[in-house]
Amino acid sequence: MKTLITVVLSLLMASFGFSQKAINETKKDTTKLEEVIVVSRRKLSNHRQEKTLSSIDDYLEKSNKVTMIKRGNYAWEPTLNNMATERLVVTIDGMQIFGACTDKMDPITSYVDVSNLEKVTIGSGQEGTEHGHSIGGGIDLKLPTSKFNGSGFKSGLDLGYETNGNYKATGLDLTYTGNIFFITTDGIYRKSDNYDAGGNEEILYSQFEKYNISLKSGYKFSQTQHIDANLIYDKATDVGYPALPMDVSLAEALISSLTHYYKPEDKALKSIETKLYFNTITHIMDDTKRPIVPIRMDMPGWSDTYGFYSKAHVIKDKHRLILNLNGFYNKSLAEMTMYSNNPNEPDMFMYTWPDIRTLYSGVFIKDDFHFNDYETLSSSLRLGYHRNKISKAVGVQSLQIFHPEVKDEQDRFLISLASTYQLKKENYDLSFGLGYGERAPSVSEGYGFYLFNNFDNYDYIGNPNLEDEKALEANFNFKQKFNDFEIGITTSYFHIMDYIIGDLAPNVSSMTIGANGVRVNSALDHASIFSTYLNSSYKISERFAINGTLGYNYGKGNNGENLPLIKPISYFAEFNYNTSKFNAALQLDGNGNQSNYSSMYGENETADYAILNLNLGHIFYNKLGKTVLKYGVENILDTNYSTYADWNNFPRQGRNFYVNLSFVFP
């Protein structure tokens, strides 16, 4: 392990060393610290990502600030700035969509695939509040833009296979583009058996099967107006979760939208985009394939969301304005049936989400004021009205056992504001920002009833009387370029007030057999989260380049306890070779020992690890179009390891050989 750490540090130091010959000369180019990850299949051949058929989860994990919590081999939960999805706003092309699983086995990212998307936009902290209120930031999964270029028919075919888990993937897309009309459809199918951890250790219940189909069409009325209609159907079955006591027999989503675009000839008003949307999710947990469980249970959940937004772009003098008016209505319902092992005793039924209705409406305003060609001040404000209603009377009665003053309705007014100063010069750029944000408790935090968390082995009870969670934040980014050498640092700090987390209820009996007890959601007075990342790269020649990243994170509550799921020291180093038709990359990826773990909230110490990956790619051109071949091996040394973000320390994949073949027909 020490040898591998030495290697990555040597690569980082090599970047600094190589820079000495470049300091005397600068290049007229600046690159803003990346906030956007491109994931369109048509653009994948030039991306650092090694596989053309990688999942959305794999792409997101390449970002410094994003880590994926893994409960199995499917549907990883994204965290941003060491904050999970309760503190984030995750949207699909600006559309609000909410999972239907009380155990967070269906994050929003699991209901789309690379075939649906063009890019992913990541906004840290209050920079990510265009589509809703958050503390940690926003992730928006962008659908492809409209095309009226008259290029006619196009198609593409993707094939993928991986040895570990006998994983198979197939994708197909067909497109017709005219001058006033276009239609595109695509589908992707993925199937995996149980995978093996390092040392050929089979991980039971890690299988899954999924397919995703999408259809998008558009019609152009004139040079200033057109409409798009979009439909995505996603279905996963037989999904195993080795880190949890239950699996998933069905995770199904239908996502639909109709969008009107208006681009007037007015010089100030650049565009107005208005979208109406509806999505519905069905999620069914069961334990029928688990051979031994204390008691059999069915836990289905449903989530329906209706919404809209209308967004305008205005350019006036030195101002670049975005105005976004949006709203949604969501219905979240989940239930649990526990089947008695004694035929003389009745089964037990209860609502774990007692039909919670959420109504939200808000407005977002952002102004980028350009002092000159180098300096910009970006300021944003979001105001919102948030209302929850418990539609099931039994839900109110159940929560009144723990909170006698509970009412069936709760109104909240939320505010978010941020301001960032940016200076961009020929060979460097820097930015400094401040922000303040508020968020309402999630459905589980506010209204969940006996939700079992096997991470700390406690049942959780929601608290509708929780205060809004609030955060002050500061961030700093700096990047310097010396010809072919580049170095940058990005830092963020969050002071979170009324930090929502479970508190022990010593005199309450648990519902789950074998649970340690019950926690009722309450709030710490405050908590602090800090992160910093050092990034460097050096272009040795036209074909060779190296880059490296070193990160440090910290999180602690005012009670002196470490916060859970805070990333330890991390590092990444990569050596690249690229030509116009071939690329190769050798990667070293690892984390240090997680010594600052949170034993109070179920964490234990996670050992350090480091893995090596080798990725290669070819592009072939012929009369029919383009063929892209991606192949390589992950975890070359077959290391048996788990990370801090692997639920209950279940191990990740061992050695894995893969090949992806993509055909693009113009």
Image: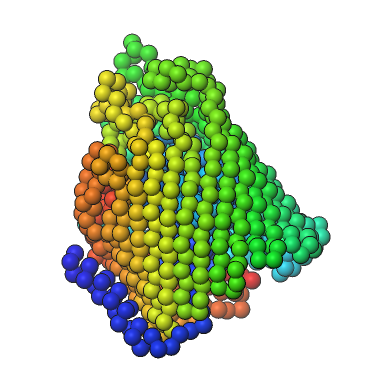
Residue 356 position in % (x across, y down): 52, 28
Residue shown at 54% from the left, 24% from the top: 409
Q: Farthest residue toward the left? A: 2
Q: Is residue 370 above or below residue 132?
A: below
Q: Position of residue 431 (x, y in %)?
A: 47, 65
Q: Can residue 307 be seen in the rendering of this structure?
A: yes
Instruction: Give above or below for 51 relative to 241.
Output: below
Q: Which residue is found at the position 47% from the left and 58% from the top?
A: 433
Tell which of 664 and 15 is nearer to you. Answer: 15
Q: Nearer the viewer, residue 60 or 204?
A: 60
Image side of residue 487 versus residue 624, left or right: left
Residue 259 visible here: no
Residue 153 falls in which quadrant of the image?
bottom right
Q: Residue at x 27, y 20 (%)?
A: 507
Quarter-of-image position of residue 387: top right
Quadrant of image for the C terminus: bottom right
Q: How many marks?
A: 0
Q: Position of residue 11 (x, y in %)?
A: 29, 75
- In the displayed structure, 317 sits above or below 198; it is below
Measuring 55% from the left and 69% from the top, which residue is drawn there? Answer: 375
Q: Is residue 648 left or right of residue 153?
A: left
